[in-house]
Image: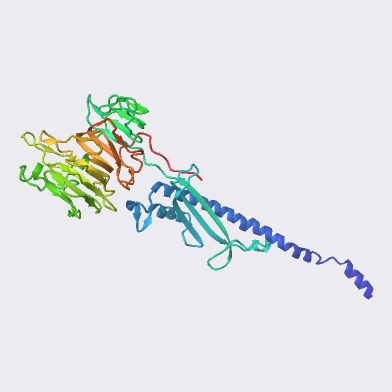
Amino acid sequence: MIAKAFRRLLRDRRGAVSPLVTLLLIPIIGAIGMATEASSWFLLQRSMQNAADSAALAAATNACDASIAACVTAGSPYYDVEAKSVAAKFGFLHNVADTTVVAANGVTCPSGETNCYSVLITRKTPIYLVRILGFSGDSVTASGAPARIVNAIAVARPKGPPRGFCLIGLQTGNVQSIRINGGPFVDLAGCDLWSNGDLVCNGSGSDTGVENGYAAGTSSCGANQVGGAGTLSDPYSALSAEPPIPTNTCGALNATNYPQGSSARTLDATESFATAVKKCGDTRLTTDVTVTTPNSVLTVYNGHLDLNGHTLSTSGSGSLTIIFSGISVNGGATTYHHILMNSTGTGTVDIAAPTTGLLKGVAIMQDGRLVGNRNALDMTYNGNDPTLKIQGLIYMPNGEITMKGAINLHTGGLRCLGIVAKKILVSGTGAVFDNTTSECVQAGLILPPVPDSGLRQALVR
């Protein structure tokens, strides 16, 4: 009886599958973990990559960093704020839910430049089922749970500002509003030209570095010579008004109110630029003057500014606009010279224009309302008499400027120079510094763009 029961038990297969199922639970749970958790990492990474791509493009579009005072808000650089804001719209908030969003500029691009922007999004996601396979993660969450790090990075090339015309001749009609004479010593690298009359380049190498030469009349300048382009309206005509030019309080037109020559007013280091500085008549520097106040304005009414062998400069956060204005009168024997000059020694103007305000981007200007034969508006610049180191715009809508020497970059400043005048003559060794308009947006100056010259920001990695 007992033997029979034992034989029956040996033949019984009920429940035999249970140990097998138990043994298979580990690979089954592991497979489920791989199918769910691991695939969720892939989907999360795809979502993070979309967010990183959009955030990097946003950072590159702003193209501002903490080294530029005008691009800083609330102590943070715009590109960083913009990148985190865009990432947040995709559900990735910095320092929330074990997530970090880090933006950087000055990143090396695949092409070798170092002006790219990157955004790195990292999230620690808890792991559960895959732990049964022996994977304990590569990090821990804020609560101490094992986690898998998922990240996405995007690198974008910054959007370049549209290339602008750094020389613009406003005089219309059958005239040479811009003429460039000379040979290999004329260096206009990075400078495009627009003339409301004819645009003429004489001599081998006279337009060295010029890519685009546009003219209402004929054009013989640049690799891309465009004649019959129509006339360009004065893009800065609104400057010739009160404001931004401070109101003239000098009084009636006479020698007492507007002294000349040896009776010139003086400008020295004791001058306070906390408010606009006004000088009536000829003005002479008696010592070097350094402006450290932002958005400073020096206005000379019915007179010239004589550097007298000294240096007028800006430093730190200081910025300056030099304005020549006055009373427009026809007739009379007195001539007022509304120009920058140097009577002795070697004078220097080394200034950055304001980057904000009504005069943003404007370094030196003549009031466009100055007309008539009492006003001498034309200026010849020889390169070292005086020496010009400018960040911003030189604006002489009714004056002619002759350049016989190089205009250099403001010490420690941005690469930005624009010259708008009635007529412009460049000869001899006349030059502007390389890539002359490449940083004008940061400098606050928007020059009329060369048609179809805008660059697009693009993802590069």
**Along the viewing direction, whichever of 96 and 119 lies nearer the viewer:** 119
Q: Can residue 274 be seen by looking at this rendering?
A: yes
When the figure is inspected, residue 356 is found, relative to residue 126, above or below; the finding is above
Q: Does the image show residue 357?
A: no
Q: Quadrant of the N terminus?
A: bottom right
* Picture quadrant where residue 230 is located: top left
Q: Position of residue 210 (x, y in %)?
A: 35, 31
323 with respect to 456 (left or right) = left
Q: Give coordinates of residue 16: x percent, y percent.
A: 81, 65
> Left or right: where does residue 337 sit relative to residue 19?
left
* Residue name at image x 26 percent, y 48 percent: 354
Q: Is residue 85 left or right of residue 284?
A: right
Q: Quadrant of residue 345?
A: top left
Q: Residue furthest bottom?
A: 2
Q: How many marks?
A: 0
Q: Quadrant of residue 453?
A: top left
Point out residue 287 in the picture as x, y percentages from the top left corner: 18, 50
28 sits to left or right of 189: right
Question: Taking 71 as reference, is 344 above or below it?
Answer: above
Q: Position of residue 377 (x, y in %)?
A: 16, 36
In depth, the one of 61 and 104 nearer the eye is 104
Task: Name the residue at 30% across, 45% down.
Answer: 410
| Residue lying at the far front of the rendered structure | 345
Depth order, front residue of 73/297:
297
Q: Is residue 44 above or below residue 407?
A: below
